[in-house]
Image: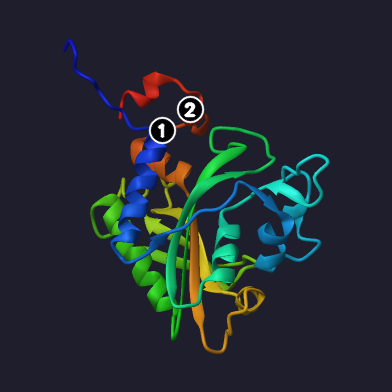
Amino acid sequence: MKGKTFVHIHPLTRVVNDVVRAFVSLGFEVAGGPEMESAYYNFDKLNFPKDHPARDMQDTFWIKDVPNTLLRTHTSPVQARFMEVHKPPFAIVVPGKVFRNEATDVTHEMQFFQIEGLVVGSDITMGHLKGTLEHFLKNLFGKDVPIRLRPSFFPFVEPGVEVDMQCFKCGGSGCATCKKTGWIEILGAGMVHPNVLLASGIDPKKWQGFAFGMGVDRVAMLRYGIDDVRLLYTGDLRLVSQF
């Protein structure tokens, strides 16, 4: 119609808005930080050993002629910065763009969006983590979504888990979306490592916490049936106009 304006929201923006809205409804506040970061906040404050492979050139974009400076490889440095200047209890959600020096294909890009969450309080348990994630996934996908936690390793949490959700396409019976397993890996999570709390001046004997992180791009691909992550970054208006 002449004179009518149509507003289309990019699928990544739509997912970020929906995820943030779900966590804000639980009492989380939104936090942010710089995309160009120091190795101190990106690695050291998060319990990454000096010889951790994530520090290598093949995974990290280091800034030329600027010592120990890089494009952040995850949004977790925001957690480290926040804990330095805020006393618990608190709950934050952190959306933002991150960068990895890796080859691109249908499921990988050198730039992508993450959303992380951090909760620190007294008597926080894995039960709080599981309940929070179940509530979030219900908000995101509009129904109760069974989840499972599998042991995994991340330097900044202990114990660490991979979180799978039951496939929303087939209901767990197995399909192409879940590669016939009935489950889709959706995020990584765990209890905040005591060393991470100590590095920010928080007493781990008094305070505990959980953290989680997910790739927004993957959620958008699953939610909207997008089969190549690179399509999200071409600027092609034919993609955006569908939303």
Residue 81 visible? The answer is yes
Task: Using the rendered image of the protein, determine whether residue 172 is visible from the camera's viewpoint.
Answer: no
Q: Position of residue 125 (x, y in %)?
A: 44, 80
* Residue 58 appears left or right of 182: right
Give the residue furthest to the left: 1
- Compared to residue 84, the image places residue 33 above or below, namely above
Do labels 1 and 2 touch, CB within 8 Å? yes
Residue 116, position in %: x, y? 49, 58
Is 23 in front, or is 173? 23
Q: Nearer the viewer, residue 237 or 79?
A: 79
Q: Residue at x 83, y 41 (%)?
A: 65
| Amino acid type at image mark 1 | Ile
Q: Which residue is mark 2?
A: 231
Residue at figure coordinates x 58%, y 80% from the top left: 202
Of 53 and 91, the residue lying toward us: 91
In the picture, measured across the screen, residue 223 lies left or right of residue 42, that is left
Distance Cα–Cα, label 1 vs label 2: 8 Å
> Which is closer to the viewer, label 1 or label 2?
2
Q: Is residue 120 left or right of residue 205?
A: left
From the image, tell me which residue sits under label 1.
226
- Disc 2 is placed on an element classified as helix
- Callout 2 amino acid: Leu
Which quarter of the figure has residue 138?
bottom left
